[in-house]
Image (cartoon, rainbow, N blue to C red):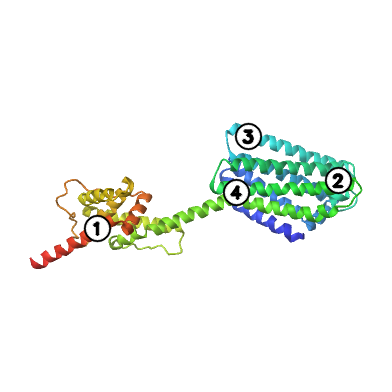
Amino acid sequence: MDGHSYYVPAAAMAIALALKMPALLRNWGDPLIRSVCALMTLASLVFFFAAPPTITEVNHLTGVTNMSAALVYVLLSAFSGSCLVLITNWRGGPPEVTRRLSRRWIGGYAGVCAAIVVLFVLGDAPVERVRDFDTYYANTPFLREMIVLYLIGFTVAGVAMHVMCWRWALQVSGWLRAGLLVIAFGYLVNVPFAAVKLVAVAARWQGADLDGLSTYLAPALASLGAQVSAIGFCLPLAGQRIGDAWTTWSTYRRLGPLWRELRPVWAEAGHEVRISWWAPAQLLMTQRESDIHDGMLSLYPYFDSEVRARAYEAAVAAGSEPVQARAEADAAMLTAAVRARQDDPEGRVISSAVADTPTLPAENPRDLVRMSIALRQSPVVAAARTWAAATRSESDFHERTR
C-alpha cells in the first residue's frame, strides 16, 4: 500500500472533523459529540502517521530511529479506546454508568499507551524498518513485549466493539440496527488483522519467516475493517436523512390532488415569491402546505356542515373506518365549497338550511394527506363533486330564466 492509500482516508476524516467542529464548539458538554470528534481526530492521525512516507519523515525529523513505530502504536491504541468510548456514549443509559464505563476504557488504554512508550524507550531498535518493524524486531527484548501489547489491545477493542454492537443491534431496528451490524462486521475484520500479525511474530520466535502476512495481508485487512466500520458509523445518519427526504417527497407528492383542487382559491392570493422546483424538499412541502391552508381559510364561508355530515354517513356505510370517513367527509365538503365559491363570490354557504357553524377541516399533515387521497380515490367525494356540479348547473338555469 502506497502513501495515497493512507492519505486519502486521513484527509476524508479531517474534512469530516472540520464539518463537525461547529457542533463541538456549540455543545462541548455533550460526551457523545466529544467522543465522535476524538475518534475522527485519532483516525485521521493514525492513517497519516502510518503512511510509509510519513514514517520516514518522522524518523528523520525526530532523529530517533523507528520513532514512528511507537507513535503509530500509541495512536492506534488510543483510537481503539476512543471507539469503545464512542459506542458506550452512543448507546446511552444512566449517565453515571456511562461515565464510569467511559473512564474505565480511557484509563485502560491510557495505560496501554504509557506502557508502549516505556517499552520502546527500554528497547533497542537501531535499524529503521518502515514496513516490517513488527517481524524484524519480534525477538528484541522490550520491543517484543511492546508489539504484543499493542496487538492484544487492538484485538480486545475489536472483540469488545463487535460484541457491544451486536448486542445493541438485537435491541433496536431500522437504520441504527443496520449501521450497528456493519460496524460489528468491520471490527470483526480487525481480529484477523491482529491474528495474522501475531502469527507472523510467533513464526519469528520459532525461526520461521511468515513476514508476508504482517507486511502485506495485515494492512489490507486493517484498511478493509476501517472502511467497513466507517460506513457503519455513517449509515444510521445517512439512512435517517434519506428516509426523511423520502418521507417529505412522498408527502409532497400525495398532497398534490388537494393542492390542485384548491389552486383556483389560493392562486388568487397572488403570492409574489414562488419557490423554485429545485429548492429543498422540506421548503417545497412547506410552500404547498401554506397554499393549502390559505385556500381553506378562503373557503371558510362556503363550508357546509350538512354536506360533511351526509358524506361521513355515506363513507361509514361504505365500510370506511372513522378516521378515513372523516377525511372523506372533509374532502367532500371542500370540493363542494370550491364549486360554491365559483357560483357565489360573496361568501354564502352552500345550504342555507345549515344551522351549526361549519369548521375548517383538520390541518394535521396526516389528515391533509388522507383528504388529498380521498379527493382522488373516494366515490363519496366523487358523488359530492357531481352533486355540486349539478347544483351549480341548476343554479345557472334558474339565473338565466329568471
The CA span between labels 2 and 3 is 38 Å
Tell me the residue at 16%/53% (across/down).
Answer: 351
Q: CA distance from mark 4 to mark 2?
A: 35 Å
Residue furthest bottom in the image:
400
Earlier along the polypeptide chain: callout 2 or callout 3?
3
For image coordinates 56% across by 43% down, the residue present is 27
Q: Residues within 10 Å of mark 3 (few under 14, many from 20)?
A: some
The residue where tag 3 is placed is 99
- Which residue appears at 20% of the width and 47% of the height? 357
Q: Amino acid at mark 2?
A: Ala
Q: Give the number of the disc on residue 202.
A: 2
User: Which comes sooner in the sequence, label 4 or label 2?
Assistant: 4
Question: Which quadrant of the structure image shows residue 155?
Answer: top right
Number of marks drawn = 4
Residue 67 point in image, percent of width and height = 83, 49
- Whether residue 171 is visible here, answered yes or no, is yes
Q: Which residue is mark 4?
A: 179
Q: Position of residue 339 (x, y in %)?
A: 23, 60
Q: Quadrant of residue 372?
A: bottom left
- Say whether marks 4 and 1 touch (CB < 8 Å): no
Label 2 crowd bin: few (<14), some (14–19), many (20+), radius 10 Å: some
Spot occupied by residue 75 in the image (x, y as percentages of width and height): 74, 46
How many angstroms separate mark 2 from mark 1 (CA)?
Answer: 84 Å
